[in-house]
Image: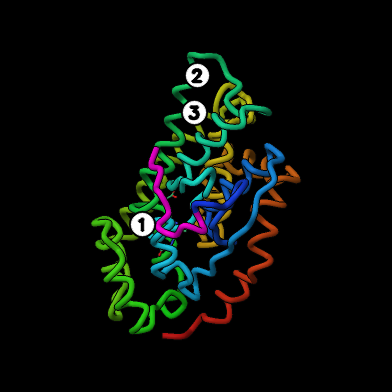
Amino acid sequence: MVKVTPTNEAIRQLQGLHLYHSGRSNCSARVRLLLEEKQLAWTSHHLDLLNKENISEDYFGINPKGLVPALVHQGASIIESNDILVYLEETFPEPGFRGVPEAEQAEIDNWLRKSGDLHIPAIKTFQYYKLNAALLKKSEDEEALFWKLQKDPDLRAFHGKHSGGKTFSDDDAAVAIGLLNDVFEEMERALNGQDWLVGNVYTLADISWGPTITTLLSGGFDFAPFPNTERWYALICQRPQFDLAVLQWRRQQNWEQRVAENKGHA
Ligand SMILES: N[C@@H](CCC(=O)N[C@@H](CS)C(=O)NCC(=O)O)C(=O)O
């Protein structure tokens, strides 16, 4: 688990749980979902990714990768959304979301690891390929600041692919879709004859993956070959906490409308 000491003293002094997040981000949404499930009080620090509010010296002082989410708690910033889920589960164990027998605990960890591992090569690549380039384009100043602040080699490689008028190729998308099809085939097997991913109990695995489906659906990913996954997703959508933490935040940001308005722009 990566814990960062925020560079800004005022942020180190914050009391309670402070989440730096974005309405449309699936990584942020899984953390909001667990916060709601645990009924924890938290303070929202919303960053509009389309306005590149994450590209600032201040925010890189909270998350050195410049990504949302980051959870600030007791003077430290915890980054990586799936690590934040584990941190919250360990720090605030009740109600618990690892309620399966010992032998199945590793399956929860596997789903969390997969969610993290697939983020750049599959989920983020698919979304950037599908979204209009104009929506994500950085201004010259934003580009310059981004390349100055961003030190992470994977993120430099990723963002290098859609800067200076370039974007992700059909081949990049095909690789991403292949990885996604593989993971959803696995999900189909896990959900065969059961409602939830591990041990038929609602766990961190479901909390991690539910919001990812929302994001992929918005990019037009085809879930028709995955009926168990569709059924499971319909079930998770029925949770009031999911509506509050995931769907309402997207609606508030007018995300679908902003995407639609930008269609057709170069
Ligand atoms: N592995 C990270 C990925 C976080 C991530 O990529 N967040 C996206 C939103 S879902 C973001 O901040 N994008 C802005 C950017 O790449 O500049 C996590 O799980 O927290």
Q: Amino acid at mark 3?
A: Ile
Q: Which mark is residue 108?
A: 3
Residue 77's spot in the image, x, y percent? 46, 48
Q: Residue at x 48, y 84 (%)?
A: 264
In the rendered view, does 165 fall on the left or right side of 189?
Answer: left
- Give above or below for 145 relative to 221: below
Dot 1: element: loop
Q: Amino acid at mark 2?
A: Glu
Q: Is residue 180 magenta?
A: no
Q: Coloured how?
A: rainbow
Q: Residue at x 54, y 29 (%)?
A: 90
Dot 2: element: helix
Of 72 and 47, nearer the camera is 72
Residue 46's spot in the image, x, y percent? 58, 63
In the rendered view, does 72 fall on the left or right side of 169?
Answer: right
Give the residue at mark 1: 64
Q: Which residues are magenta?
A: 1-11
Q: Residue at x 27, y 55 (%)?
A: 154
